Image: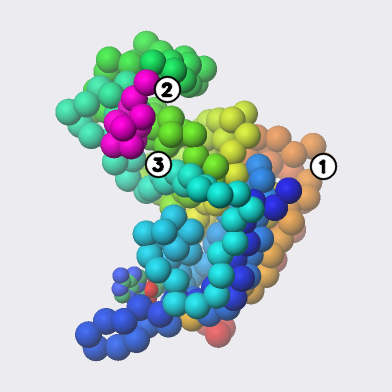
Amino acid sequence: MQLLQLKELSKNYLTKKQVICALKNINISINENEFIVLVGPSGCGKSTILSIIGDLEKKSGGKIEFNKKNIKVGYMFQEDALLPWLNVLDNCMLGLKIQKRVTEENKNYVKSLLKKYGLESFEKSYPKELSGGMRQRVALIRTLATKPDILLLDEPFSALDYQTRITVSDDVFKIIKEEEKTAILVTHDISEAISMADKVVVLSNRPSIVKKIYDIKMDKKGLPSENRKNEKFNFYYKQIWKDLDHYEN
Ligand SMILES: Nc1ncnc2c1ncn2[C@@H]1O[C@H](COP(=O)(O)OP(=O)(O)OP(=O)(O)O)[C@@H](O)[C@H]1O
Ligand SMILES: [Mg+2]
């Protein structure tokens, strides 16, 4: 079932000196439980799309249609943004605290997520005592704590080294699928996009339009690290690499 639709979405940023046309007629539809990945050249407007969906930025034109009322959005960014002076459990409770939704039930939900995803014994630990991968898992659990309908992930793995990035992509993917969430992830990494996505949306240079949308179909689709070895993987990689040709307009 469709969860949200971007229709002819456009965005102009007005600065003192100029008007920057970031997005032009973006059309994307997102189904429930779908994992969408946005790729595109630097500065093409990927973060802008997430900010508009999350209502952090106003659109200049077009429509966003949600099929539910009061849809809740959860964010996860490049930096895990955990507060160093709070322990893991308190960091995970932060969003609920801000929204004044700290109840026994919600706290138990957070604790159950920490347990399910191997962080139970780190509840009282501080972020600096965790590895980069564990911090990203904590950041995701904090995002899930408020039970969002859709997760917006803006280059969540780019601060991690390559090895950690592969394992954390598996972890985050598993959690998102198990918790049956809809997600939109932004990345510069074509391999990451293909290995995680149901659909890859390729954006053009600014002003950005949707250049191509790929339904990633593989036999025996599994965890991202397994999908990287799938025989279809190279086919999609070559196509998307071509689409992202930076010298073309
Ligand atoms: N608040 C703002 N004011 C003015 N211009 C902005 C603002 N935010 C973004 N832009 C411009 O809009 C364009 C799109 O920016 P955006 O951050 O969405 O790109 P991006 O695809 O996420 O880039 P990157 O891959 O580098 O993260 C860029 O040219 C950027 O300079
Ligand atoms: Mg960005």
- Residue situated in front as seen by the camera: 218 or 3: 3
Tell me how far mark 1 sits from mark 3, CA to CA.
Answer: 29 Å
Q: What element carries label 2?
A: helix
Disc 1 designates what residue?
219
- Please rate how many residues cluster around mark 2, counting C-alpha atoms within 10 Å: few if below 14, some from 14 to 19, many from 20: some
Q: Nearer the viewer, mark 1 or mark 3?
A: 1
Which residue is depicted at the point 31% across and 32% down? 100
Q: Residue type at mark 1?
A: Asp
Residue 22, position as x, y percentages in the image: 44, 77
Q: Residue type at mark 2?
A: Asn
Q: Which is nearer the N-term, disc 2 or disc 1?
A: 2
Disc 3 designates what residue?
161
Quadrant of ligand 1: it is bottom left
Q: Residue type at mark 3?
A: Asp
Left or right of 134: which side holds 30?
right
Disc 2 designates what residue?
106
Left or right of 23: which side holds 196?
right
Q: Is mark 1 on a helix, strand or loop?
A: loop
Q: Which is nearer the N-term, disc 2 or disc 3?
A: 2
Tell me how far mark 2 sits from mark 3, CA to CA.
Answer: 33 Å
Q: What stretch is highlighted in magenta?
A: 93-103
